[in-house]
Image (cartoon, grey):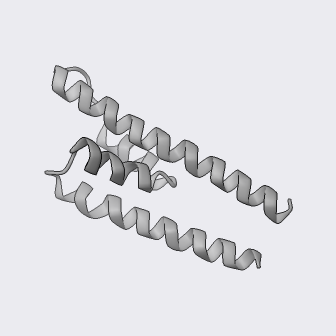
Amino acid sequence: MDKQTLIITAGAILLVMNCLSFSLMAYDKRCAAKGKWRVPEKTLFLVTGLFGGLGGVLGMQILRHKTKHWYFKVFFPVMLILQIVLLVIAFRALG
């Protein structure tokens, strides 16, 4: 696979995972407001951890959701930073 294809594939994965992460946060917020079944926290962490860090952090900030839970306030930004570092390392390795 050439460099351009890798970049496009990585970009597509990042877009999908971040949109999914943000959407799950929005859905969970709506469910919480209506007293309905909620998205499990481990699901939110899993999607955010699988390169959905920006979507998770934006979901917290824009939707003001899960901001009272210390583990979300700490680990979502940490996962985002780790994802950025991993992406920078990967793209530098590509040359």
Q: Which residue lies furthest to the front in this view?
A: 62
Between residues 11 and 28, which one lies in front from this camera angle? 11
Q: How many marks?
A: 0
Residue at the (59%, 74%) spot, across then down: 88
Residue 95 screen position, x and y as percent: 77, 79
Residue 9 screen position, x and y as percent: 71, 52
Point out the image quarter for the N terminus. Answer: bottom right
Between residues 52 and 45, which one lies in front from this camera angle? 52
Residue 92 screen position, x and y as percent: 68, 78
In the image, 17: left or right of 5?
left
Residue at the (56%, 71%) spot, across then down: 86
Residue 35 screen position, x and y as percent: 16, 21
Q: Identify whether 53 is placed above or below 74.
A: above
Between residues 44 and 27, which one lies in front from this camera angle? 27
Q: Identify whether 44 is placed above or below 91.
A: above
Between residues 45 and 2, which one lies in front from this camera angle? 2
Residue at the (47%, 51%) spot, across then down: 52
Whether residue 39 appears in this view of the structure is: no
Q: Residue furthest left?
A: 68
Q: Identify whether 34 is placed above or below 81.
A: above
In the image, 47: left or right of 86?
left
Q: Which residue lies furthest to the right in this view?
A: 1
Whether residue 37 appears in this view of the structure is: yes
